[in-house]
Image: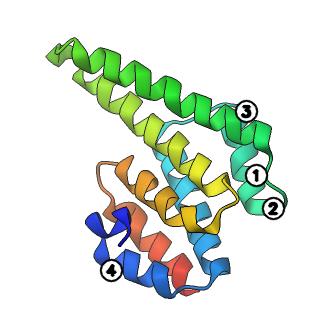
């Protein structure tokens, strides 16, 4: 069972039956959409998306940068969340979404095909309305 099952059992099932090529394509779609939607920017984000498009050997330095970005964003949102200030809630959610999107990119770039479903889970967790991402991801798993 994937964590993805907790968000969309249908998508998880489609993922299980998709070819590795379609799984990678769906992960690229998810990471691209979510990075754009949550405003995740930076040279490492651009490089990661390009690497996902082009394929090839895993760039360990790029992966390290994405893991660092994700950890930094996690630390920031957790620190703000501990302040329990309702006025900061939108910023907490914004940072959480960016952290999940960065984590999705890291899983997608890991070089381990078994981590692609984790990339999808993290990508879907990054957005308020996962259905807007699920549809194009499901299409990518089929096409």
Q: Residue at x 52, y 50 (%)?
A: 104
Q: Quadrant of residue 25?
A: bottom right
Tell me the crowding category of disc 1: few under 14, some 14 to 19, or many 20 or more residues within 10 angstroms, Cα based.
Answer: few
Q: Do callouts 2 and 1 mark residues in contact (Cβ within 8 Å)?
A: yes
Q: Which residue is mark 1?
A: 50
Q: Which comes sooner in the sequence, label 4 or label 1?
A: 4
Lateral position of residue 51 relative to residue 108, left or right? right
Q: CA distance from mark 4 to mark 1?
A: 28 Å
Nearer the observer, 80 or 86: 80
Q: Residue at x 48, y 59 (%)?
A: 118
Q: Do callouts 4 and 3 mark residues in contact (Cβ within 8 Å)?
A: no
Q: Which comes sooner in the sequence, label 2 or label 4?
A: 4
Tell me the crowding category of disc 3: few under 14, some 14 to 19, or many 20 or more residues within 10 angstroms, Cα based.
Answer: few
Lateral position of residue 22 relative to residue 83, left or right? right
In this rendering, is residue 34 above or below 96? below
Residue 58 at what x, y percent from top left?
Answer: 79, 53
Residue 102 at what x, y percent from top left?
Answer: 54, 40
Secondary element at image label 4: helix
Q: Which comes sooner in the sequence, label 3 or label 1?
A: 3
Q: Which residue is mark 2?
A: 54
Q: Which residue is mark 4?
A: 10
Secondary element at image label 2: helix
Q: CA distance from mark 3 to mark 2?
A: 16 Å
Q: Which residue is mark 3?
A: 43
């Amino acid at each position: 069972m994937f964590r993805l099952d907790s968000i969309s059992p249908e998508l998880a099932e489609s993922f299980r039956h998709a070819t590795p090529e379609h799984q990678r394509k769906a992960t690229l779609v998810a990471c691209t959409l979510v990075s754009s939607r949550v405003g995740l920017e930076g040279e490492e984000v651009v490089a990661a998306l390009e690497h996902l498009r082009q394929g090839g050997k895993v760039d360990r330095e790029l992966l390290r940068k994405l893991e660092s970005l994700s950890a930094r964003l996690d630390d920031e949102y957790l620190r703000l969340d501990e302040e329990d200030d309702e006025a900061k809630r939108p910023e907490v959610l914004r940072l959480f979404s960016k952290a999940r999107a960065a984590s999705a990119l890291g899983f997608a770039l890991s070089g381990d095909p078994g981590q692609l479903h984790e990339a999808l889970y993290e990508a879907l967790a990054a957005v308020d309305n996962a259905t807007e991402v699920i549809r194009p991801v499901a299409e990518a798993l089929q096409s």
